[in-house]
Amino acid sequence: MNQRFLDIYFDTEFVCFKSLEPLSIGLVSFSDENLGAYFERTDVDKALTKFSQPDKAFLSGDVVPQLGNMELHKALQSRGVALQAGYLPQISKALHSYLAMLSNNAKSRRKSVRLISDFEGDFLVLDRLVDISAQKELGLCYAWLSDVLAQNRRGFPAYHAHKKALFDHPEKFVSGAQFKRHHAYFDAWVMAQAANAESSES
């Protein structure tokens, strides 16, 4: 575990690469799941007016059915995950407040928050939700998952094998709720679990 950073793994869902219109974002701390949070738009219909036609099947099949799903919301809350659903300005404000909380938490331990993702689009969507200048004021740091694994001499084959096993068995996340790939919090949780499982296998 890195002693300099409070590592937060995150994933986003968005409309398409052209608009990067945010739909949801999930953030996970492997060391303390009570720090986890999930933010989701309720005005999805408005957001989806900005999709490109090739994205329609993917969004309607894999992403949209998991948005506004009360069963999934209750499952997240049962795990202690902070959840905020609302219009885009509301979740942007809530996300900024959450990141400020994380920053204060990290500073109290003489650390910095490090946001980790495996996909460039996630960082771009984050910038749409929270202004870059505001992120700088919070002292946030950033890292590619590949760099984190390399720094810790963790192999990609074992990481991907563990990740696939978790996606194939979502009941390991929570039983009784039908989480699937492309739910932002579930995807972030899988990434965190798979990345940190490596440390015990190395």
Image: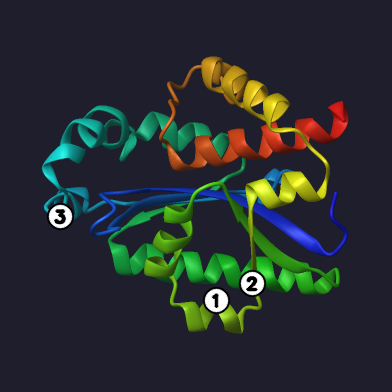
Q: Mark 1 or 3 closer to N-term?
A: 3
Q: Position of residue 139 (x, y in %)?
A: 66, 78
Residue 31 appears in the picture as rendered: no
Colour scheme of the rendered structure: rainbow
Residue drawn at x 18%, y 31% is 57
SS label for mark 1: helix
User: Disc 1 marks which residue?
Assistant: 135
User: Disc 3 marks which residue?
Assistant: 50
Above or below, comparing residue 27 to residue 105 in the picture = above
- Density class for disc 1 (Cα within 10 Å; few <14, some 14-19, many ≥20) is some
| Amino acid at pointer 2 | Leu
The one of 195 and 22 positioned closer to us in this rendering: 195
User: Disc 2 marks which residue?
Assistant: 140
Q: In this rendering, would 182 be left or right of 50? A: right
Structural distance between the alpha carbons of marks 1 and 2: 6 Å
Q: Mark 1 or 2 closer to N-term?
A: 1
Structural distance between the alpha carbons of marks 3 and 2: 30 Å
The part of the image, by quadrant, that contains residue 59 is top left
